[in-house]
Image (spheres, rainbow, N blue to C red):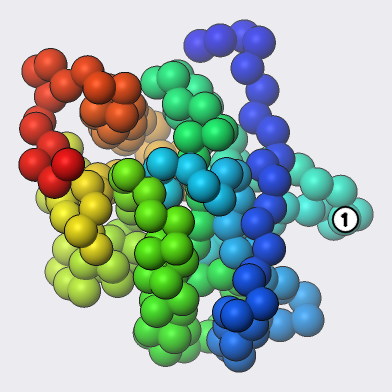
Amino acid sequence: MDPNFAPVVWPEDRMPPEERDYVECEVCTVRSRVIWGEGNPSAPIVIILDNPGAREDKEGKEFVCGTRVTLQTSLHQVGLKMDDIYLTYLLKCRPLGRYDKDKARAFSKPFLERQIKTIQPQFIVCLGDTVVQNLFADQEAHVKDLRGKWHNLMGLPTIVSYHPLAVRRRPNLMKHFMEDWAMLAQHFGGVSTALPPCPYQ
């Protein structure tokens, strides 16, 4: 591990005016603002999580949460840079209470799909069962069965892996998590020797 590497707060991408109807989603409250995405909005790699974690502490100061620490550290270890990455979410607000999960996710999915079409990335990465099940439209889909191979999502080369929070809670998943990022990074860098082929490029 690089002792000089330190996770940072990635720049936040604001909600486009034409998508302002998203505030009607039930997870959007006065205490939970919309976070459209983070990182480079023109990045070649789009990473999708279920919902944003906190970006500010109780005093309102920006900080890097555990999920982002694990994600950024793993990206750094395989040579991917912040400019290569755009991080976005199925739900654009952090849920702060009980909500109808199926309804909120169904409401949010078209916004995410339009967002991906606008960005036109080279690769998509889906992290966690919630994202995989919703974007693949299969409630029986699980990361453990789909990781380590390429998929086609919206016509784009896609991989799936574990949610960074799951990796933090179950360190035995880190090996698989890093294998998935290495697979992506090597294809992204044009080196695919001894890796599963990417049939969608």
Q: Residue at x 33, y 49 (%)?
A: 124
Reading the image, the residue beneath label 1 is 60
Is residue 6 or residue 184 the one in the foreground? 184
In this rendering, would 84 be left or right of 140? right
Please state which amino acid type lies under the numbered disc 1.
Answer: Gly
Residue sitting farthest toward the right: 59
Number of labelled discs? 1
Q: Residue at x 56, y 10 (%)?
A: 2
Is residue 126 or residue 67 the one in the foreground? 126
Other-residue count near label 1 (Cα within 10 Å), few / some / many at <14 / 14–19 / ≥20: few
Task: Provide residue 121's location: percent of width, then percent of height.
Answer: 38, 49
In this rendering, would 32 be left or right of 112? right
Q: Is residue 63 in view from this perspective?
A: yes
- Tag 1, which secondary structure? loop
Task: Provide residue 87's location: percent of width, then percent of height.
Answer: 51, 50
Task: Answer above or below: position of 136 versus 66.
Answer: below
Task: Answer above or below: position of 154 versus 19.
Answer: above
Q: Quadrant of residue 150?
A: top left
